[in-house]
């Protein structure tokens, strides 16, 4: 049996058959990993990354020197009931820098992106993301680079802090963004959102700026649902017409109701309105000519624009 090949204890003994198999295989990594396991250790005693450990483990499995359920990787730290990370000590960090190549290589790469030497507190945060959250070095470096880009966009010379990177890392981990491929796809989506979101902000409000967090939530939905510029403008107009101001959640409700009814174009909305005669289609008393039958909104765009200038958009954070 494979289990019979391992004899942990103060005196290390190796089965002759195991030695012969390792010698014939000529795989130094497999031999070193086998020695660690025979001594009652795990791969944490070796300065290797996960891929190298996995390769050595597969060789030992092929040779029949370890059972399928043999624990090779270091045990994952147990999360506490309130999901707090362990309190890593300075010794934990020092051992990680010495024995874990992935973390050891990650530190100078992050320092280069941030343009500073990481403090002991910074190292604890970074190791928490690496060890506790289990995010690979390449994902953490990608995340750090993206946070640096976001900070730079807010002003020259600005850099993210490790607590800010930690906050974003928890979001990534919760969303399952734990591979380089998933990180790249996520950042492409964010790039599209930022670009298209800024276009919609300009379209609706005539402002050149990046959406704030709450606005981005609505914009992300609208972009994914593919609402056209004309449909967005019509929803904006009707929001302002009814509220004498602008609220994101009200406009979002209009768009979602149209979508539920299958109304995906301005023409479809107008046709539906003519058939169902909704209350908001009845114009308010006002001086001047009545709107023509084919006019898109019940009030002129000029009137809506005047309303919009008078009633600025409500802060989305206060909408509840």
Image (cartoon, grey):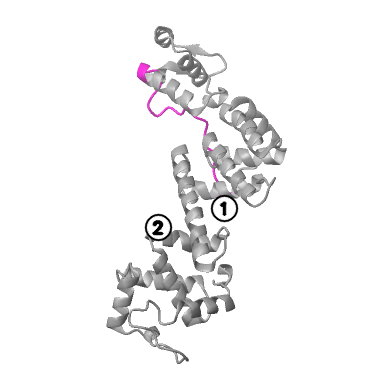
- Contact check, label 1 and label 2, Cβ < 8 Å: no
Q: Which is more toward the observer, 82 or 158?
A: 158
Q: Which is more toward the observer, 25 or 106?
A: 106
Q: Residue furthest left?
A: 275
161 in relation to 76, above or below: below
Can the viewer see residue 59?
Answer: yes
Rendered image: mark on residue 252? none
Q: Position of residue 113 (x, y in %)?
A: 63, 37
Residue position marked by numbered label 1 in the rendering: 82
Q: Is residue 74 magenta?
A: yes
Crowding near pointer 1: few (<14 within 10 Å), some, many (20+)? few
Q: Which is more toward the observer, 84 or 169?
A: 169
Q: Which is more toward the observer, 133 or 80?
A: 133
Identify the residue shown where x is 66% and y is 35%.
Answer: 111
Question: In terms of secondary structure, what is the magenta stretch mainly?
Answer: loop
Can the viewer see residue 136?
Answer: no
Identify the residue shown where x is 47% and y is 14%.
Answer: 31
Rendered image: mark on residue 224? 2
Identify the residue shown where x is 57% and y is 73%.
Answer: 314
Q: Position of residue 248 (x, y in %)?
A: 50, 70
Identify the residue shown where x is 44% and y is 20%.
Answer: 56
Nearer to us: label 1 or label 2: 2
- Give the residues drawn in magenta, as a range: 62-84
Q: Is residue 255 magenta?
A: no
Quarter of the rendering occupied by the C terminus: bottom right
Q: CA distance from mark 1 to mark 2?
A: 34 Å
Crowding near pointer 2: few (<14 within 10 Å), some, many (20+)? few
Quarter of the rendering occupied by the N terminus: top left
Helix, strand or loop at label 1? It is loop
Q: Residue furthest front?
A: 289
């Amino acid at each position: 049996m494979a289990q019979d090949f391992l004899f942990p204890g103060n005196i290390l003994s190796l089965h002759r058959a195991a030695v012969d198999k390792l010698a014939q295989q000529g795989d130094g990594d497999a031999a070193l990993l086998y020695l660690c396991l025979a001594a009652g250790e795990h791969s944490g005693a070796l300065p290797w990354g996960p891929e190298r450990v996995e390769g050595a483990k597969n060789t030992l499995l092929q040779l029949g020197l370890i059972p399928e359920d043999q624990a090779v990787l270091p045990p994952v730290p147990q999360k506490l009931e309130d999901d707090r990370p362990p309190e890593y000590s300075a010794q934990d960090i020092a051992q990680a820098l010495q024995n874990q190549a992935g973390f050891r290589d990650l530190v100078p790469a992050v320092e280069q992106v941030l343009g500073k030497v990481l403090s002991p507190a910074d190292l604890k945060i970074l190791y928490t993301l690496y060890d506790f959250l289990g995010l690979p070095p390449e994902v953490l470096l990608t995340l750090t680079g993206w946070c640096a880009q976001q900070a730079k966009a807010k002003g020259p010379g600005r850099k993210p802090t490790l607590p800010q990177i930690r906050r974003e890392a928890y979001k990534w981990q919760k969303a399952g963004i734990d591979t380089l491929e998933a990180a790249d796809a996520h950042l492409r989506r964010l790039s599209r959102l930022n670009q298209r979101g800024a276009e919609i902000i300009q379209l609706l409000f005539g402002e050149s700026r990046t959406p704030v967090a709450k606005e981005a939530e609505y914009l992300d939905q609208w972009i994914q649902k593919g609402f056209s510029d004309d449909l967005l403008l019509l929803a904006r107009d009707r929001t302002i017409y009814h509220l004498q101001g602008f609220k994101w959640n009200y406009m979002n409700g209009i768009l979602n109701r149209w979508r539920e009814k299958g109304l995906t174009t301005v023409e479809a909305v107008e046709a539906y309105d003519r058939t169902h005669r909704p209350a908001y289609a009845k114009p308010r008393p006002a001086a001047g000519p009545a709107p023509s039958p084919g006019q898109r909104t019940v009030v002129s765009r000029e009137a809506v624009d005047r309303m919009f200038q008078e009633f600025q958009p409500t802060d989305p954070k206060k909408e509840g």
